[in-house]
Structure formats: C-alpha cells, structure tokens
C-alpha cells in the first residue's frame, strides 16, 4: 500500500520504530518503548491544521478530497422533525463519477482494500460506484470542546486495553499515536447520546437465497457522552438493548449489553431473555468471536460495527494513513423509501452496487494480530477507518493467512444533533459464500430520544420487553 503520510513524518509524529519496505512503499512500525504524550503545542493544532476531532483539515493535493469546513449542520429540504427516522438524501441528485470492477481494478488498486479487490475477483457482478466526496461530519460544541481537553488529559491503561477516567465526552485521542488509541476512537466515536431505531439483519446463503434473520427495536445510550455531566458516571460507557419482533420464531427475545472502560477489571455485562425459558440469564460469552445470535451465526460479536468490544485479545499496530474508497454518506441505504428495499438490495452473492455509495476519504490503517496463546476465528484483521467518522472497511484473515471476511460500514448524518450514526453494515464470508447485511430497513434511520429511566437498563426490564 502507498501511504499518504511520508515515512519520515510518520516516524517523527507517531513515535514509532519504523522500517521501510521500498518495493511495497510500506512503512511497518512497532510502538517504541517510550512514547511521547500529546503536548499542549500539538493539541493547539486542533481547530487549525486539524479538525476539532483530529482529522486533517485540508483537502488532498488534487482536490478530490475537499477541506473540512464544518460538516453538515443544516437540515436538508424535506426533513420532517415529526418523522426523524425518514431522512432525505442530500445527495440524491448526484451520479457516480466512475465505477470500479474486476476489469479496471488494477487502475485503482492503491485505493482499494484487499477485501474489495477479492470481491471483484470472485464475483464479476461486484463493483463499487464512486461519487464526489463530501465531508459531512459535524459534532455538537460540547463534544468538540471535550475532545480538545481529552487531547492532553486522556490516556490508555493496561497495555492500551483500558482508558483512564480522565477521558470523557469527546474523541479520546484526537491525535492518536498507537493502534489501541485509534481503536478507542472507533469504539467511542460520537453517534449521539441516546437514540433508537428499528434494526434488521438479513442473511443470504451461498445459493443466493435471502432470509430475514431478525428485526429488532433497539435503544442505545452512550453514558460517556452525557452532556449534563463532566465525567463518567460509573464504569460502563455504553448501554444497548433490543427486543426482537421478527421472525415469529424469535419474537420476544431480548438482549441487554453494557461495555466497560476497563475490560480487564470488568467484563461486558450481557443478559438475554428467551421466551421459551421465561427467564433472564447472564450471557458472558456474547463477546469476541462468538457467533452473533441475531445474524444466525454468520458473523461474530466483535465484527459488529467493524469492531466492537474489548481489545485484550489482539495487538493493534498503527500502520499510518492513506486515501481509500469507502462506503460513505449512504442515507439512501438507511431508508427504505430511497428505492433500496431488501428485495432490490440483496443480490445473489453480494449487496446491490446500485444501493451503496463509495467516496474517496483518508483513513487510519490499523493491523490487529491475535496475541500469543489466544485463539480467534480471524487471528489477523486489517482496519480502515475514515479520519472524520471512523466508518470504513475491515478485512479478516483465517489461521492460514487467507482472506476470509470482508466487512463494510457506512453512516447517516443526523442533522438535528449533529452527529453521524453508523447504521448500515455488511459482512461477506469468502470461504462459505454467505453474506450478512444489517441496517434500519424497513423502518428508517436512527433518531435521538430523551434519556431512559435507570430501570430500563436493569436486566429485569427484559422480561417485560420479551413477553409475547
């Protein structure tokens, strides 16, 4: 891969020991024993050369990536506050600049992930449509203010697996220096404080037959982003709950999860309610590479949102930054009224290229390798996270080093907050030929709500949710 960040600059700013493979143009880096903290001088670049969240403010040299000028904060024409789940696509009028498939893939190879190239090589009908780039990411003022504070006060602990309690209310590491810091930015990206939506999972088998795996009404609260507080209330930064409404055989199932800032001290709290058992049970195994129940076991728990959960099974290495084509600004994917219903979108071997918008963006590149003595179904992973929103792509490799999983994630701007909600995602299994698509269709995109009563987050609340 050819990286944007020059080797000398990467070595200086990232405080890495780096070696250069000249033939590949690849900087391979390992964390130095002594790392420099973000200084006040470095932090002053936020809002100047860097956006308030740490991305490069300027566009790229050829202008294909524009400068960030504040993001999308204005409600687009047609947005109805009484129907916040139905979001008009502000770029519905745009046409693709060009398309990339197996025939012209080599011309764009430096901006494609190995996963995208593998899909093009395996399926002649697979392509990506590249549209003009828009840097729509925007955040409330309190999130930008807290991110500036986090730059000099926030730190990782327990070999990067945990974060300090000094981190709060903004991206924890706007100027990341390690792979773990980038992963924490991904996990704690801002998508709003409290929100809900209807989420649907579809599984398409190797023969091309789609099946509704589950439809769930979901609610999420990022305690970490509570604007009424200045520090974390408790030890858990994220609360999630859903109740399944379809198909009929799963109706009434309910799930509650809480993720901690220090997974070495406290594990994920996960509870399930199964109507057939009529009881709530603690489910500590709903983590890592455990198959995801709501996706019929076709994806793993830590594949959600490209990566979700504790980092303690992997060593994460920050490779650098590069330009890449990634899914972006896909409002039409999120809302069924945008002519991408499941019937149209779910093709035999892959998601319909007509329904997925790609743009050129700068991404953080992180490599995750499983730690010695630890097993995982994907012992090596590559992550490509957009510098503004932290959506993007991920590739997973099996124990033999063969590319096995290809993941994508996109987002919808939530104009009224403002924030970027990471709604749509997909996972292709190159070995089995099965793929999974998750998104809020039918039903529309996520929308903000008022904080829920504390009782709503108690395991006992799942009983009421799951009654059928």
Image (spheres, grey):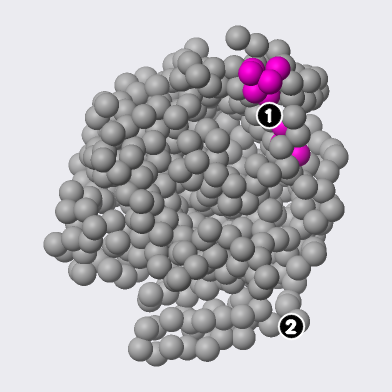
* Residue 186: image location, x then y, percent: 59, 52
* Foreground: disc 2 or disc 1: 1
Which residue is at a point 44% across and 36% down the rendered structure image?
Answer: 438
* Residue 101: image location, x then y, percent: 19, 57
Which residue is at a point 79% across and 32% down the rendered structure image?
Answer: 228
The quarter of the picture where residue 177 lies is bottom right
The quarter of the picture where residue 285 lies is top right
* Residue 54: image location, x then y, percent: 59, 59
Residue 8 seen from this side: yes
Residue range of the region highlighted in magenta in the rendering = 269-278
Residue 272's tag is 1
Q: Is residue 11 above or below residue 413?
A: below
Residue designated by label 2: 33
Q: Is residue 297 above or below residue 186?
A: above
Which residue is at a point 75% across and 39% down the rendered structure image?
Answer: 269
* Residue 165: image location, x then y, percent: 83, 52
Would you say residue 273 sits in the magenta stretch?
Answer: yes
Which residue is at a point 84% across and 38% down the rendered structure image?
Answer: 233
Would you say residue 74 sits in the magenta stretch?
Answer: no
| Quadrant containing the N terminus in the rendered view | bottom left
SS at circle 1: strand
């Amino acid at each position: 891969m050819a990286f944007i960040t020059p080797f000398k600059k990467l070595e200086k700013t990232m405080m890495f020991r780096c070696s250069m493979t000249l033939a590949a143009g690849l900087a391979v880096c390992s964390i130095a024993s002594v790392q420099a903290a973000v200084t006040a001088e470095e932090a002053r670049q936020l809002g100047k050369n860097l956006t308030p969240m740490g991305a490069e403010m300027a566009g790229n040299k050829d202008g294909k990536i524009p400068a960030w000028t504040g993001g999308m904060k204005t409600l687009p024409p047609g947005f109805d506050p009484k129907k916040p789940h139905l979001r008009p696509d502000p770029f519905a009028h745009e046409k693709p600049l060009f398309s990339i498939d197996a025939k012209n893939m080599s011309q764009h190879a430096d901006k494609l992930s190995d996963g995208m190239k593998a899909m093009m090589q395996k399926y002649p009908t697979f392509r990506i449509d590249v549209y003009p780039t828009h840097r729509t990411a925007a955040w409330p003022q309190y999130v930008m203010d807290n991110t500036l504070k986090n730059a000099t006060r926030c730190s990782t602990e327990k070999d990067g697996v945990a974060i300090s309690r000094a981190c709060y209310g903004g991206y924890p590491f706007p100027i990341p220096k390690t792979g773990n810091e980038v992963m924490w930015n991904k996990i704690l990206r801002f998508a709003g404080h409290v929100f809900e939506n209807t989420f649907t999972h579809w599984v398409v088998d190797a023969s091309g037959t789609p099946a509704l795996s589950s439809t769930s009404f979901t609610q999420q609260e990022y305690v970490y982003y509570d604007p009424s507080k200045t520090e974390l209330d408790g030890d858990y930064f994220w609360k999630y709950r859903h109740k399944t409404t379809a198909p009929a055989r799963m109706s009434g199932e309910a799930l509650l999860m809480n993720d901690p800032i220090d997974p070495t001290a406290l594990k994920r709290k996960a509870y399930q309610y199964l109507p057939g058992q009529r009881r709530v049970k603690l489910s500590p195994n709903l983590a890592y590479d455990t198959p995801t129940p709501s996706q019929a076991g076709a994806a793993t728990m830590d594949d959600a949102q490209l990566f979700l959960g504790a980092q303690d099974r992997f060593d994460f290495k920050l490779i650098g930054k590069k330009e890449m084509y990634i899914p972006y600004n896909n409002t039409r994917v999120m809302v069924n009224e945008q002519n991408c219903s499941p019937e149209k979108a779910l093709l035999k071997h892959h998601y319909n290229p007509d329904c997925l918008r790609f743009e050129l963006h700068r991404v953080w590149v992180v490599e995750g390798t499983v730690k010695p003595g630890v097993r995982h179904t994907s012992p090596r992973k590559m992550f490509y996270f957009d510098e503004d929103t932290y959506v993007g792509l991920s590739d997973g490799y099996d124990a033999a080093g063969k590319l096995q999983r290809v993941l994508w994630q996109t987002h919808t701007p939530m104009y009224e907050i403002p924030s970027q909600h990471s709604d749509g995602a997909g996972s292709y299994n190159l070995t089995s030929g099965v793929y999974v698509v998750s998104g809020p269709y039918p039903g529309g995109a996520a929308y903000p709500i008022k904080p829920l009563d504390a009782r709503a987050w108690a395991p006992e609340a799942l009983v009421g949710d799951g009654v059928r």
